[in-house]
Image (cartoon, grey):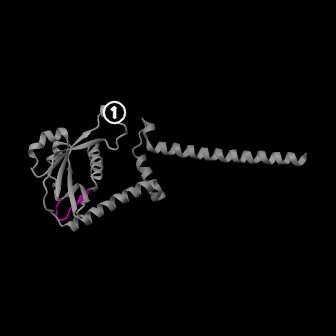
Amino acid sequence: MKTKLTLELESTLYAYCREAGAFAVEEVTMPDDQGIVDTLSYQELPSGDIEWRCYELKVTKSDFHSKAKLSFVGHYNYFVLPLKLYQTVADEIPAHIGVLIYRPFNKEMLATATEAPSTPGYLTVARPPRRQDLQVPESELTTRFIASQAREVGKAKQMATGLKQYSTDRLYQELKKRHQHYDVYDPEANFYDQFIDDTQSTAVTALQSEIDALNLERHDLQQQLKEQRS
């Protein structure tokens, strides 16, 4: 589960890459046991050459010292860190690895902004990276980049589709799971109760609409009968 701060770094970095004219995608698995790149960006230069950049996002000291493989396989490679963490681990970062510092927007900055920011913070370059040769074949990077983009498109389509993609049986099973966590001391917190209340409310509203329509129809018929008798 990603922390709130990690998600803030991700969304800010994504916007940072887009503003630079690059395409970015998160969590790209590398070949040959090269690990997973937190964020991989692809950019076509005016010369026609392709430039690949890899970003590793770290939010705590223990995260920075994790045994997970650092997938610095691109032409340029970066750590993306909060300022306090960078100040703590700066001496441990290899000279050829760049560093982007994340700072959240504070209340004073937001108060003076002419437009609401699209990201929770901003990035500054604390250390530029040095160019290196790709550590994996470029064809592999391209294939895995496209596969990761397709995965994200699939997620977006699922979100747009919502519950319509699930069968009634599947939804019923999920409701039963929620019922297992029923809290008798706090009924308002129970999703199951909320669902039942909403369902009943919807049913009552539908019935009332039908009754109103029947009453209106009966009234019209009565009026027609009166006119015929007169």
Provide the major secondary structure of the magenta segment. loop
Q: Amino acid at mark 1?
A: Thr
169 left or right, relative to 218: left
* Quadrant of residue 148 within the rendered picture: bottom left
Residue 75 versus residue 220 in the image, above or below: below
Apparent side of residue 177 relative to residue 228 in the rendered image (left or right): left
Camera-side residue of 68 and 105: 105
Q: Pick the quarter of the image with the C terminus.
A: top right
Tell me if mark 1 has few (under 14), some (14-19) or many (20+) residues whose alpha carbon lies within 10 angstroms of its own.
few
Residue 180 drawn above or below residue 150:
above
Percent position of residue 107, x then y: 31, 32
Give SS at disc 1. Answer: helix
Place of residue 176 in the rendered image (x, y in percent of width and height, measured from the top left): 43, 50
Q: Is residue 77 above or below residue 87?
A: below
Residue 71 visible in image: no
The residue at 34%/36% (across/down) is 113
Q: Quadrant of residue 76?
A: bottom left
Q: Position of residue 115 (x, y in %)?
A: 37, 39
Residue at the extreme front:
46
Q: Is residue 113 visible?
A: yes
The residue at the point 57 percent across, 46 percent down is 202
- Vertical side of 118 occupied by 154: above or below: below
Count up the numbered dots.
1
Q: Position of residue 135 (x, y in %)?
A: 14, 62
Q: Where does the magenta region start and end?
A: 27-34
The residue drawn where x is 27% and y is 38% is 104
Camera-nearest residue between 146 and 183: 146
Report if residue 67 lies within the magenta region: no
Task: Identify the residue under disc 1.
Answer: 112
Residue 33 belongs to magenta span: yes
